[in-house]
Structure formats: structure tokens, C-alpha cells
Amino acid sequence: MEQLNAWFTELLADNSIFTADTLGYYLDGLGSTVRLVFLSLIIGLMLAVPLAIARGSRRKWIKWPIFLYTYVFRGTPLLIQLYLIYYGVVFIEGIQDTFLWAVLQDAFYPALIAFTLNTAAYTTEIFHGAIKATPRGEIEAARAYGMSRARMMRRIIMPSAFRRALPAYGNEVIFMLHASAIASVVTIMDLTGAARFVYARFYAPFDAFLFVAAIYLCLTFAILYLFRYLEKKLLAHLKPING
Amino acid sequence: MKKLLALTLLGMVMTTATAQARDTDEVRLAIDVPYEPFVYRTAGGELEGFEIDLGNELCKRANLDCTWVEQSWDGIIPGLLSRKYDAILSSMAITPERENQVLFSIPYYNTPSVWITQRDRNIDISDKDALEDLSVGVQRGTIRDSYVTQMYGDTLDIRRYSSSQDVANDLIAGRLDLSFEDYPVAVETFHFRDDDSDFKQVGESIKTPTSIFGKGAAMAFRKRDRELAEEFNQAIRGVYADGTYDKLMKQYFDYDISLPVGKQ
């Protein structure tokens, strides 16, 4: 053990890159990334549930605008959406004088808006697909009990749709974490921003980016584990009886 | 059979070796566009600017066939080391950290850096307490990034951008309180010396400490390409000696960016 310790100290003593100073940058970056991704996922989820239900509506004037929204945000790169919301809006005449500027002035909120709208669009489609895939029998049974549409939605369709959507939603969460790497283009010091800073300062791309890749891997592992746990709990009834 | 295999392998190694050696007459020069007035694109899409003219003149003198390669600042040194091009001619200041990675020519210009803010603002850059909560924009990985990080890291809110254009956009948009920019670039993007400009300089122009700002801007080469660097050194001395440098400089600047003779 002591040998290992000595070996480790020696290993770190030799490098001029991973000092307490730069590790601090990575730590701050981790904070920004987690904050940004967590908030956009939560808000995105809250938007996506009503949107997914409305997306399945029979009324065209409800259905089509939502389809258009998900189509636009799934059909264009997130980077472009971020550029438009951060750099683009500046060129709207007089925007600095409106109340919107208080939100758009900072780099954090434009990024949060772009990420939220993007993940909400994907999540809407995931949930919509899951709702559509509800077995006919469950709906017929609910009707036979005399449930109203709202109650059927609440008690029968949504609980089973959420379960079905879980694996796909887990993927979306991981995609969102990785997509957040572009936040550094609008000056946010997220994990990738910290890595780019360290890279620019020491001209050591391998060290800077491999280190940050390892942090992303750890985060992804945590997310995977969380969803594995949720699936095990919530989808227990789908497992083969003797499995 | 083994012999044949060894020979083939040897042959492959040798051909790749020759393919990798620089063809001495052809030189690819990397530059980060735009960086007015050193380099910018005309409406027709042509590259223009002081460094383009200077680079072409140097190549002519050294009898080299030069082509320009556009490269963003972030990756400009790794690109050189990975042989995407043979030299950098892109307002790169000589600094000790960079000298660890590349071989510099003699410097060909030296300009100070300036603080820029909106005309109606009153900012005292020497009053550290008053700088709390103010934001400054710099291009990531430049000497100006190093300067504000070292000198103002604990007071100013430092925002780092990929290009100097983005910094300018956000100062114009009102997202930033300050920009710390290379003097000529600031003249070109903010026109801060004009009376009707919305921007003004704050405090003195800054050239020191040399440990951060270096001895001026120079071309950068791979460390092994000593001969190539020497050819360009000769050419730089040449354009200084016969007045060509002054003529080119006057086309783009109404102030002096040249280095004192003998100091290059």
C-alpha cells in the first residue's frame, strides 16, 4: 500500500498539468455541467408529458403545432439551436431594452433554453410513442369499468406508458449529458470548457481531453446504474416468471 | 519468405518516410481567419490583410511555393505538430510555453493589448474592488487570456470565446463590460479611436510583463524544421532592410507595429 502511495505521489509530482489549480477548473466544470443537464432534463420532462398527451389528440389544431415543434427541434443540430438562441437573438433590434434581455444576457439561460427545448422535443416523441403502444385490451378494460378519458389516462395509460418509455428515456438522458459538451462555445465553463481551457494553456490535448472523457464516463455510469435500478423495480412484472 | 516480408515492410517504411518529408519548395502556412486587419475575407471570398501580404512577400523572397490553410486558433499548434501544415503565420506571440512545443522565427511585429468598453461607461481598471462583478471577454488560449487569468482571475468574471469575432459580438450586444483585445484588432472591430464610436479605450495600452506578452509575434515551425525557419528569418530581415515592410505596414496601419531594427 505504501509503495502504491509513493508511486502515486511520484507520478503526480512529475506533471505540471494536473495541479490543484486545474483540478479546480474541472470541478467547477462538473458543477456547471450537472446543473445545466439536470435542470434542462427536469424542465424538459415537465413540458414533454402534457405535450405528448396533446400530440395524440384527434384535433388537428392541437396535434400539428406540436408535431411541427418536435420536428424542428429534432430536425436541426443542437449546436445551431444554441447559436441562434445565444448569438442570433442579439441582432433583433431593441432586444436589449426588453425584459427578455435579463434572461438572455447571461450565457447560462440561453443554453438552458436551447437544451430544454431540445430534450423536450425528443422526450415528447418518446412518450408519444409509448402512449400509442398501449395494448388495446387495457383501454377496453378501462372503458368497461366506465372510466372517463382523463381517469383512464391517469390510471391506466400513463403508468404503463412511462414504464415502456423508461429504457428509451434513459438513452435520452445520456445523450443530453453528452450534448451538453457544446455549452462551452457560448463561454460556459462546463466540463468540456474546462478541458478546452487546460488544453489551450498547456497545449496537451491528450491529457486534457482524456481526463474529461473519464469524468463523462463516470457520469454516464451513474446514469446507467440509476436507470438499471428503476427498470428493475418498475418493470419487474415484465420479467419471465422463472427468469 | 521471412526475408521477403521484412523487405516489403522495410520498403513500406521507407516510402512513408519519403512521403512524410517536407517537399522543400511547397510550404503550407496556417492562419486563423478573421483577425482584422492582419487577415480577413473580402466580399469575394479572397484572403486579404497584412499577414497575407507579408507572408506572400516572404515566400517570394525565400523562393517557396506557399499556400494558405485556414485553422481555428484552438488547434493551431497541434495542427502544426501533426503535419497538417508546415508553419504558422498567424499573429502568434512568442511565449515560453509555446517555445516548448514549436520553433519560432524572429518576431515580425509587436503590438500592445487594450481594454475596451462602451463609451458611456466609467471603468477604472486599476481599482480592483470596482472590477468585482464586471465581465471581460477574451479569445481562449491567447496571451490576453493568460494575462487576465493571471492578473484578474480573482476579480473579473472572465469569459473565454473561440474567436475574437465572438468577443466583439458580445461586447457590442452588451453582454460584456470589457474586452481585452490586441490593439490593431480593437481598432478594426470597435473603431474606438473615432469620435462617433460607441466604444473607448480604458487605461493604458499594455505590453508587459514580457513573461506573458512575449517578444512579439513570430512565425512558428516544427522544432526539426530549423532550415525552413532560417529561410524565413532571412526573408524577414530582408523585408525590414529594404523598406518593403514599412510599405506593407502603411497599407494597413496608421501607427507603428514594427520592431526596432536589430531587435528582431
Image: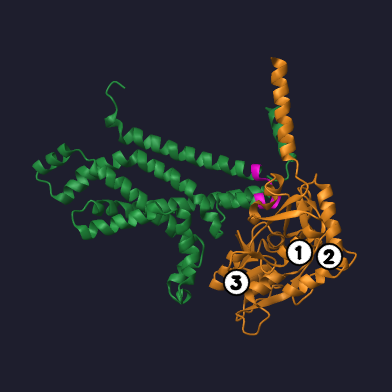
Chain in orange on the image: B
Q: Nearer the viewer, mark 3 or mark 1?
A: 1
Q: Main secondary structure of the magenta part?
A: helix
| For residue B242, above or below residue B71 | below
Is disc 1 on the same chain as disc 3?
A: yes
Extent of the magenta region: A199-206
Question: What secondary structure is found at the residue carrying circle 1?
Answer: helix
Compare marks 1 and 2 and give the one earlier in the sequence: 1
Amino acid under label 1?
Leu
Residue position for label 1: B54
Residue with the mark numbered 2: B239
Crowding around mark 1 (Cα neighbors within 10 Å: few <14, some 14 to 19, many 20+) is many
Tell which circle, 3 or 1, labels the residue nearer the N-terminal end: 1
Badges 1 and 2, same chain? yes
| Viewer-closest of B187 and B114 | B187
Secondary structure of residue under mark 2: helix
N-term-proximal mark, 2 vs 3: 3
Marks 2 and 3, Cα distance to the nearest angstrom? 40 Å
Tell me: A8 left or right of A30: right
Image colouring: by chain
One can see residue B115 in this view? yes
B74 up-or-down from B246: above or below: above
Q: Residue at x 39, y 56 (%)?
A: A117
> At label 2, which amino acid type do we have?
Val
Q: Which chain is green?
A: A
